[in-house]
Image: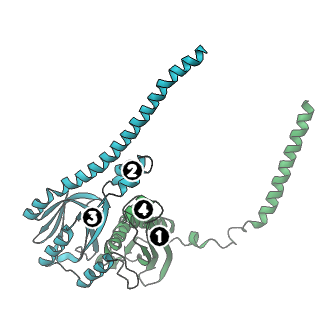
């Protein structure tokens, strides 16, 4: 009997501790998930705010991702894209690549959506959130514009560079390049609009 | 006790030898004949050789709408992956005039057959839907237009990753095909 009472006495605080520990775990997970969403939203807002005045002043758009297509650069490299009087310039910390206006064959601008939490670290974090919490984080996305510039090199070889820009910037770049004398096929514009509608 | 275990082992061993012999007897007629007489598999026999390859760009098709960024990404990723195979001295781009002087040039064409745009958000939320896929017919031909090899290849992104990753997957598969063929 004494033993039973002793067990019961020792069992009650341990259960309470367990409940408190589980509550703490759940609270921690909630805070983590909320934090992830907040960080993603804040990062997006911070990226956008300084971009507008700089772009207006010097025609340079920071935080542009070059997906593929610039020969001396690795895929998915980030940098700033500038429209110059004689063409387009993409500059990273170390390298600069120019595409002259005369070499441009066509320009396309299209809209896409990107996840707020993405990349290897983001994907791992989403997978790590239990009870399908990662799926809720996946619901948060933002619109971006994809700029595709087709151009040829000095030997006539065809190249295509794909840039991901903040919303509204690709169309502006396309219009600026067209105003500078770059070739833009009009019927392709109509085709892209058709694709976006449905 | 010892002679008993010995006989058990002997009987098991003889049984195993008999069954192995029976299996071999059954399997031997199914084997192909000597290497000189049998017709080898077409993929193994047709090892192509070329010092250079030229990748032709995929133009817009009337019946199949593929976004321009997907077509361009396919072309650029393919060039990157072909360079990585190191099977050719030079990988020429579409329209490159310097390719005209190469005698044993192989031309690679991608003929789009199917495209499904998909959605990254749908993929990540539902897991089972929203996959992006692009299916193309890969055609290796000589300069005179003779088709050397044709094969269907499909690039996909099913779970995590942006839609354009399907073009990377496709390019990797084409590079694997090049590694097998050349």
Cα–Cα span, label 2 and label 3: 20 Å
Could you say which quadrant of the image residue A83 lies in? bottom left
Question: Label 3's element?
Answer: strand
Chain A, chosen colour in render: cyan
Cα–Cα span, label 1 and label 3: 28 Å
Q: Are the residues tagged 4 and 1 within 8 Å (C-beta)?
A: no
Subunit under mark 1:
B
The answer to whether tags 2 and 3 share a subunit is yes
Residue nearest the observer in this picture, A101 or A198? A198
Residue B34, relative to residue A32: is it above or below? below
**Which residue position is annotated with label 1?**
B154
Where is residue A51 drawn, in percent x and y?
15, 59
Subunit under mark 2:
A
Question: Label 1's element?
Answer: strand
The answer to whether tags 4 and 2 share a subunit is no
The answer to whether tags 1 and 3 share a subunit is no
* Quadrant occupied by the C terminus of chain A: bottom left
Q: Earlier in the sequence, mark 2 or mark 3?
A: 2
**Which residue position is annotated with label 4?**
B123
User: How busy is the neighbourhood of tag 3: few (under 14 within 10 Å), some, or many (20 plus)?
Assistant: some
Question: Label 2's element?
Answer: helix
Chain B, chosen colour in render: green
The answer to whether tags 4 and 1 share a subunit is yes
Subunit under mark 3:
A
User: How busy is the neighbourhood of tag 2: few (under 14 within 10 Å), some, or many (20 plus)?
Assistant: many
- Name the mark on residue A126: 2
Cα–Cα span, label 4 and label 3: 17 Å
């Amino acid at each position: 009997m004494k033993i039973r009472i002793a067990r019961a006495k020792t069992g009650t605080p341990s259960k309470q501790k367990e409940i408190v520990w589980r509550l703490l775990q759940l609270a921690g997970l909630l805070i983590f998930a909320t934090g992830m969403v907040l960080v993603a939203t804040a990062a997006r807002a911070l990226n956008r705010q300084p971009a507008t005045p700089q772009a207006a002043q010097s025609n340079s758009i920071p935080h542009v991702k070059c997906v593929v297509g610039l020969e001396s650069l690795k895929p998915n490299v980030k940098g700033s894209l500038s429209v110059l009087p004689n063409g387009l310039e993409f500059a990273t910390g170390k390298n600069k690549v120019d595409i002259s206006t005369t070499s441009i064959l066509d320009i396309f601008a299209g809209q896409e959506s990107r996840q707020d939490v993405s990349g290897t670290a983001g994907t791992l974090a989403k997978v790590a959130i239990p009870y399908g919490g990662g799926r809720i984080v996946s619901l948060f996305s933002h619109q971006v514009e994809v700029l595709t510039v087709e151009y040829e090199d000095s030997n006539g070889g065809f190249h295509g560079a794909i840039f991901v820009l903040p919303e509204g910037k690709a169309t502006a770049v396309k219009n600026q390049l067209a105003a500078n004398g770059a070739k833009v096929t009009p019927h392709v514009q109509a085709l892209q609009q058709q694709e976006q509608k449905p | 006790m010892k002679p008993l275990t010995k006989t058990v082992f002997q009987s098991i061993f003889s049984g195993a030898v008999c069954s192995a012999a029976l299996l071999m007897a059954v399997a031997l007629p199914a084997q192909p004949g000597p290497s000189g007489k049998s017709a080898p598999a077409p993929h193994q026999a047709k090892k192509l050789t070329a010092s250079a390859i030229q990748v032709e760009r995929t133009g817009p098709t009337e019946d199949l709408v593929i976004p321009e960024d997907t077509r361009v990404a396919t072309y650029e990723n393919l060039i990157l992956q072909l360079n990585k195979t190191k099977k050719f001295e030079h990988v020429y781009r579409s329209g490159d005039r310097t390719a005209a002087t190469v005698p044993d040039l192989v031309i690679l064409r991608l003929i789009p057959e199917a495209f499904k745009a998909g959605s990254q958000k749908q993929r990540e939320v539902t897991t089972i839907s929203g996959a992006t896929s692009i299916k193309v017919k890969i055609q290796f031909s000589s300069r005179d237009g003779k088709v050397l090899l044709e094969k269907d290849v499909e690039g996909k992104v099913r779970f995590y990753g942006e839609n354009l990753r399907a073009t990377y997957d496709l390019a990797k598969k084409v590079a694997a095909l090049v590694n097998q063929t050349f």
